[in-house]
Image (tube, helix red, strand yellow):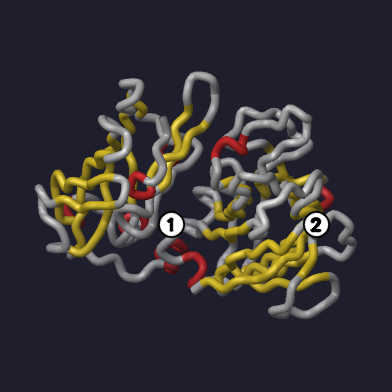
Amino acid sequence: MAYTHVIQGSNGDWTVDLPDNVTVRQGSGLPAPGPVTLDGSTTDPVIFDIHLDRSSLEGIHGLSYFTFHEPANNADSGANGLRGPVRFVIHNDTGFDFQEGQGGTFQFFLYDIVGNKNLNDPAAHPVYAHFHGIDAGDFPGHTVESAVFLSNSTNTTAPNSFIMHGQITAGAVETWGEFTLHARQLPGVNDDFLLEYYPIAGAISDQNHARLQHDIDTTDNVYYFNFSSSTSPGTTWNGWFVDNQDTYAAGQSIATRGGTYMITDAVRLNTEASDGTTNPQWEEGRVYITDYHSGATGQNWHDLFWMSDYGHGPAGFGGPGSEQDWLQTADGTWHAFGRGGDLIAI
């Protein structure tokens, strides 16, 4: 379950929804429910203690996130908004090592809920949520690379993502930072954003993946589906998800606010994968998207984010309606879609 913490910005209070394995403190203080401050003049860092354990990793491939909500006044905060020094203290309580995976060990990513905030501000300071001042000295014993991710911006002094390289040993407590977290508050715009963090594919060995998972239930089904949007005629996407047998049947439809899922086939899980006893992709609720068709343009996309070299993972973890994926247009811009049709890419 998540809980909410208040962070005082330069023009109103932001609230952040945090998973139970994360605590918040400021400076040398102890974790406490009271507000902390990132208002542009803050000197004591806000510290997020992140405990990596079975409860935070099982069933979701380690993908966790904070959700930051802008102040209710929706006012212009100028250059500040939510701005100040932060540290991440990583507690490896899993009982095993994280290792260098496919291009790194751990990734942090700031994702704006309004996708067009990923574009760069003409004033040369980005309006997407971002970091400042990330360098190798912030990650003792590791190397780090930062980038502007899922954006056409090239402002690498204000990255919205970083990847940490190197081993995190079992039982380690590592301090990353401090560096600046910055999210501007614009009038008339939804400035909410996510801070996502996850081990990169390969950072957890197959054996340790299996240790994190419940016993794989070979009485589950893989359900193949086609989703049709009700708000963008002709827009569809296809994929599959895992759930208990007899939950759905071929030909069954599932209505959502933004469209309808049609179950096209149901296949016994233990006929789908011989390695189903150790492969965590067969966890109930996982959704994989295979292709996207735009009714507006007639274009098709098959190399989607989570099915490409970028992702290697599921687009959702809670069954139909939980998925969110991205496609890239010819100009290099990324567009989000999913959530039962609430997000339409193009």
| Helix, strand or loop at mark 1 | helix
Identity of the amino acid at label 1? Asp
Q: Position of residue 264 (x, y in %)?
A: 14, 44
Q: Position of residue 205 (x, y in %)?
A: 48, 56
Identify the image quadrant of the C terminus.
Answer: top left
**Relative to 163, does residue 232 appear above or below in the rendering?**
above
Say which quarter of the image contains residue 97: bottom right
Question: Could you tell me which residue is drawn at 21 percent across and 45 percent down?
Answer: 225
Q: Earlier in the sequence, mark 2 or mark 1?
A: 2
**Tag 1 residue:** 206
**Tag 2 residue:** 10
Q: Is residue 194 left or right of residue 300?
A: right
**Relative to 210, does residue 274 appear above or below in the rendering?**
above
Identity of the amino acid at label 2? Ser
Question: Could you tell me which residue is drawn at 77 percent across and 69 percent down?
Answer: 36
Q: Position of residue 85 (x, y in %)?
A: 82, 57
Question: Could you tell me which residue is drawn at 43 percent across and 57 percent down?
Answer: 206
| Helix, strand or loop at mark 2 | loop
Report the mark closest to the observer, 2 or 1: 2
- Tell which of 56 and 159 is nearer to you: 159
- Tell which of 145 and 194 is nearer to you: 194
Q: Position of residue 1 (x, y in %)?
A: 49, 74
- Tell which of 171 and 34 is nearer to you: 34
Question: Could you tell me which residue is drawn at 80 percent across and 52 percent down?
Answer: 179
Is any atom of residue 101 visible in this view? yes
* Whole-number angstrom distance, CA of label 2 to CA of label 1: 45 Å
Mark 2 burial class by Cα count in 10 Å: few <14, some 14-19, many 20+: many
Q: Are marks 2 and 1 in contact (CB under 8 Å)?
A: no
Say which quarter of the image contains residue 10: bottom right
